[in-house]
Image (cartoon, helix red, strand yellow):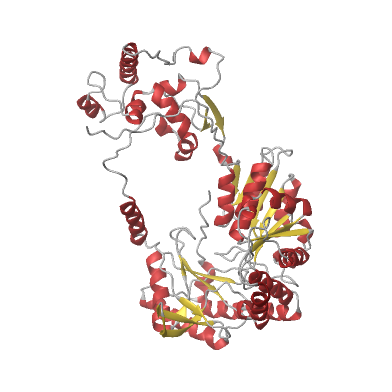
């Protein structure tokens, strides 16, 4: 039997977010109360109740209230008749008296917006469901996960099992069609040649390669090939071997782990630090663990936050409030709506990885603390690059003492891999004791720990300060020459230079032309890293890029820009028509 697709005249008044938040409760109510939900959720089909022809003809218009009630009455009669033929006593709720009883809520709670005053579904209203109205401007969702009446399981079709590969193939094809499918460039770094590398055409044939200049590496200072780091790695593997041997709790904590955590705490002027296998894991684990543990916690999150922070916030399922990127007034507006005694976490980044913006850190911290919040600050794209010792924007702005929890990476300016948090001794001990992303994973190997220690030592030295100065000089030179060439540079105060393209296919084509024709590697940044329509090239100059390399890049980029049909702008137009920034899609 062909089943028509129906649009519920009542649920259609809710927003998609509201339906998603309350879907389990709506479905549980529907299968007991609504003839339409019952037909499709449980696939009940009887000749005297659900006539296919009548249904199809009536779907050209919304069902009237009387029609729905009539069908519902017949369904209840049919259920009573079925049960009367069996030895099972029916348990069908009396919809007319259920609201008058003192029994506990059978279906949980549906959270709907204050805007939905005209919600009038007779069946949802005749079931014991609490309609608790909230202001969705707060972007607050609460879901009751206790279901008294689970929906009956669908029958399994054993003859035609689900076809997994066609499903995967269709999903991949969809990404190819919208130009968000990612093809990795095969880049082989050569020790001592940074920022040059080798592009390999054949995986197992080093002879079929050519030298390219890399302009998109996050090895911002080139420490990944520094002689001191290489020596530290060689010495560590010679003395300790390649692996750590276990989790931190089971034979995987070495003196190198403790030394690195001590140095990171010293760098950020904090009591303690904790090392993770990556900063994605550090952000996800810390935010999730804190939010779940703090009683009735709320999270206030910048709209441009990294996917790792979004993931931790989403998984915690605590009420969240999204404030506009780096908008202190909007943050304060949201904080005012939450009771001061309620635990709150304000989470944001100092340097945004895709637009290069830098927040007003001290003002953000002061507003958060004024309303009783703790702060979680991601310094991933700042550590090693700002401040006298390379501790980030917090050190540069002399506000390290105001920062509650700092997260950073060992995988960018420090030239290795891994992540960490730094803060009070009690906070880090809490995450060490409760954070599953820290507890249940193999600890970092001695080679990584030794190289990270060497990188921090360089960062805190005069050599580190010289590298930072040279990098900033190259960034200023490159940005100025790109603007003078008429390229739509997104102006930012940091070391990150984004060039707006606005089209995924063109951004990919530009990168392919650059590497194929000029042996210059820049990776296009497409969805989901940035929103559709804001696709861009993201350039990162290092201390080791020369003025000659800069001129070659600007010349090559100007030529391919025109070749793909994009227009260049004059210098005055550059400053007058900056592209609006649309940041990451938040949870």
Question: Residue 494: which quarter of the image?
Answer: bottom right
Quarter of the image where the N terminus is located: top left
Q: Which residue corresponds to the image point at 38% horizontal and 69% vertical from the top-left?
A: 506
- Is residue 326 shown to the viewer in this render? no
Residue 186 placement (x, y as % from top left): 44, 75
Tally of marks: 0
Residue 146 placement (x, y as % from top left): 54, 30
- Image: 152 above or below 440: above
Residue 122 placement (x, y as % from top left): 41, 20
Q: Which residue corresponds to the image point at 38% horizontal and 14% vertical from the top-left?
A: 88
- Is residue 320 shown to the viewer in this render? yes
Q: Is residue 166 left or right of residue 221?
A: left
Q: Which residue corresponds to the image point at 59% horizontal and 50% vertical from the top-left?
A: 312
Q: In this view, does 463 lie to the left or right of 218?
A: right
- Nearest the viewer among 212 and 18 is 212
Question: Residue 54: which quarter of the image?
Answer: top left
- Residue lying at the far left in this picture: please name it: 53
Residue 7 placement (x, y as % from top left): 34, 33
- Nearest the viewer among 283 and 346 is 283
Q: In this view, does 475 lie to the left or right of 56?
A: right
């Amino acid at each position: 039997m062909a089943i028509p697709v129906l649009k519920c005249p009542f649920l259609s008044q809710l927003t998609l977010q509201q339906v998603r938040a309350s879907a389990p409760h709506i479905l549980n109510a529907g299968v007991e109360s609504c003839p339409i939900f019952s037909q499709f959720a449980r696939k009940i089909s009887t000749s005297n109740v659900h006539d296919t022809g009548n249904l199809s003809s009536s779907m050209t218009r919304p069902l009237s209230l009387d029609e729905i009630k009539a069908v519902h009455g017949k369904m209840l009669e049919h259920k009573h008749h079925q049960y009367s033929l069996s030895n099972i006593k029916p348990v069908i709720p009396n919809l007319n008296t259920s609201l008058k009883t003192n029994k506990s809520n059978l279906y949980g709670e549906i959270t709907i917006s204050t805007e939905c005053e005209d919600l009038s579904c007779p069946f949802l209203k005749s079931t014991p469901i609490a309609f608790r109205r909230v202001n969705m401007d707060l972007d607050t969702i609460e879901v009751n996960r206790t279901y008294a009446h689970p929906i009956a399981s669908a029958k399994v079709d054993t003859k035609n099992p689900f076809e997994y590969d066609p499903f995967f193939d269709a999903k991949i094809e969809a990404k190819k069609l919208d130009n968000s499918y990612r093809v990795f460039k095969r880049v082989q770094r050569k020790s001592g040649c940074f920022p040059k590398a080798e592009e390999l055409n054949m995986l197992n044939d080093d002879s079929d390669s050519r030298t390219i200049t890399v302009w998109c590496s996050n090895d911002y200072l080139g420490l990944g090939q520094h002689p001191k780091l290489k020596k530290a790695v060689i010495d560590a593997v010679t003395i300790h071997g390649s692996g750590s041997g276990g989790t931190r709790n089971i034979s995987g904590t070495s003196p190198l782990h403790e030394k690195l955590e001590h140095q990171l705490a010293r760098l950020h002027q904090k009591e303690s630090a904790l090392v993770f296998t990556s900063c994605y894991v550090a952000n996800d684990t810390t935010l999730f663990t804190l939010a779940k543990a703090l009683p009735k916690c709320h999270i206030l999150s910048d709209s441009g936050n990294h996917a790792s922070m979004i993931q931790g916030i989403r998984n915690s399922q605590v009420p969240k409030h999204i404030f506009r990127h780096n908008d202190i007034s909007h943050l304060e507006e949201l904080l005012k709506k939450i009771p001061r005694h309620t635990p709150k976490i304000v989470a944001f980044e100092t340097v945004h990885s895709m637009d290069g913006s830098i927040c007003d850190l001290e003002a953000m911290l002061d507003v958060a603390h004024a309303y009783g919040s703790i702060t979680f600050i991601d310094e991933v794209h700042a550590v090693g690059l700002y401040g006298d010792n390379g501790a980030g924007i917090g050190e540069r702005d002399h506000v390290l003492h105001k920062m509650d929890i700092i997260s950073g990476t060992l995988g960018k300016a420090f030239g290795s891999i891994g992540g960490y948090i730094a803060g009070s001794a009690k906070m880090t001990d809490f995450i060490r004791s409760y954070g599953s992303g820290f507890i249940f994973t193999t600890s970092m190997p001695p080679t990584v720990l030794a190289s990270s220690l060497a990188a921090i030592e360089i960062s805190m030295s005069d050599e580190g300060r010289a590298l930072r100065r040279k990098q900033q000089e190259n960034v200023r030179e490159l940005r100025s020459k790109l603007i003078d060439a008429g390229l739509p540079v997104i102006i930012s105060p940091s070391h990150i230079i984004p060039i707006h393209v606005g089209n995924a296919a063109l951004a990919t084509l530009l990168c392919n032309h650059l590497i194929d024709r000029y042996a210059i590697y820049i990776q296009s940044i497409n969805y989901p890293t940035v929103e559709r329509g804001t696709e861009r090239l993201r350039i990162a100059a290092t201390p080791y890029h020369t003025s000659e390399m800069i001129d070659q890049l600007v010349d090559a980029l100007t030529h391919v820009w025109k070749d793909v049909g994009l227009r260049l702008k004059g210098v005055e137009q550059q400053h007058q028509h900056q592209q609006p920034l649309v940041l990451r899609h938040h949870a």
